[in-house]
Amino acid sequence: MTDYETVIGLEIHVQLNTNSKIFCSCKADSWGDPPNTNICPVCSGQPGVLPVLNQVVIEKGATLAAALNAEIQPVSYFDRKNYFYPDLPKGYQITQYDLALGMGGYLDLPLEDGSTRRVGIEKLHIEEDAGKTIHKPGRRLLDFNRCGVPLVEMVTSPDLRSADEAADFIRYLRKLVRWIGVSDADMEKGKMRFDANVSIREKGSKVLNPKTEIKNMNSIEHGREAMKAEIKRQIKEVEAGGVIESWTLDWDEENKTLSKMRSKETELITAILKSRTCWPSVLMKGKSRRLLKACRSFLTSAKSVL
């Protein structure tokens, strides 16, 4: 029987714990508020409004970048990711594409045998959150309270080798962001969530085979279950002579099943354009040095806790 190796990469969103949203003065935390009560013309995408960058978002994002050993860019730029979705009122998301706040980086994950696995960070950038779509029988309800909430999105390299390692990485990262004070990472409230890109290959191979993506998980244990189920499914499919197709998957926590959302080939069509209404983010050298120094001090004292 063929021995298979699991290959997992993660896409993680962390909500920064600022008082206000990224481009307006609305409060950032709307948990428990009635729908559509924490919005303004800016975050609801009304014509003629202009975003004003919250500098604290950049400082907290840079702190996280430093903690992940990324190279902090003194000047970074915002882009418009254009696509249509009901809970995106502007018709585009303000994000960072090729000139982001953090470049590269890694996090050393302690393993059970006392060794560590170095997990690379391919991308780390700042962006705004979209709203929330609530599905009801025969209708779709929209809550725009989360529009404009500041996020850090990070994409790891495909360096994780099991569902357990991926779950441990999320848990370790959650401890880190809490310890350095950039997020409370409350997953039940959607303040930290992740997607998992999962594939398998023959043990010893270096090939990256087609992967599936499990979307929008906000529980470490449920995420672990979903990844284990998908690994098992892929092995069964390959053993039967089938081919793994690049699907986006949804995990049903109640029924413990995966379902296809869409093919990766039919993903939302997007166009990335430089934002003409949002000034570049500038982080002064002195401020950057102070953030790095403070972050290193935090991490030194955190080693025994993490």
Image (spheres, rainbow, N blue to C red):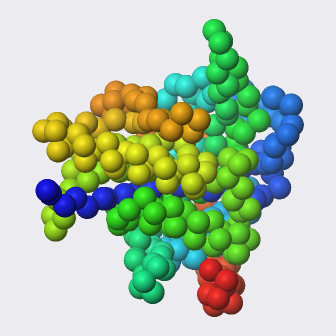
Position of residue 160 measured from the top left corner of the image (x, y, whole percent): 38, 65
Position of residue 30 in the picture relative to residue 119 (left or right)? right
Quadrant of the image containing the C terminus? bottom right
Position of residue 144 in the picture relative to residue 162 (left or right)? right
Which residue: 34% across, 61% down? 158
Position of residue 121 measured from the top left corner of the image (x, y, whole percent): 43, 66
Position of residue 70 measured from the top left corner of the image (x, y, whole percent): 49, 73
* Above or below 27: residue 247: above
* Above or below 192: residue 213: above
Which residue: 70% across, 38% down? 147
Position of residue 131 measured from the top left corner of the image (x, y, whole percent): 67, 34
> Is residue 124 something one can see in this rendering?
no
Between 24 and 161, the one lying in front of the other is: 161
Which residue: 41% across, 51% down? 228
Quadrant of the image containing the N terminus? bottom left
> Is residue 302 something one can see in this rendering?
yes
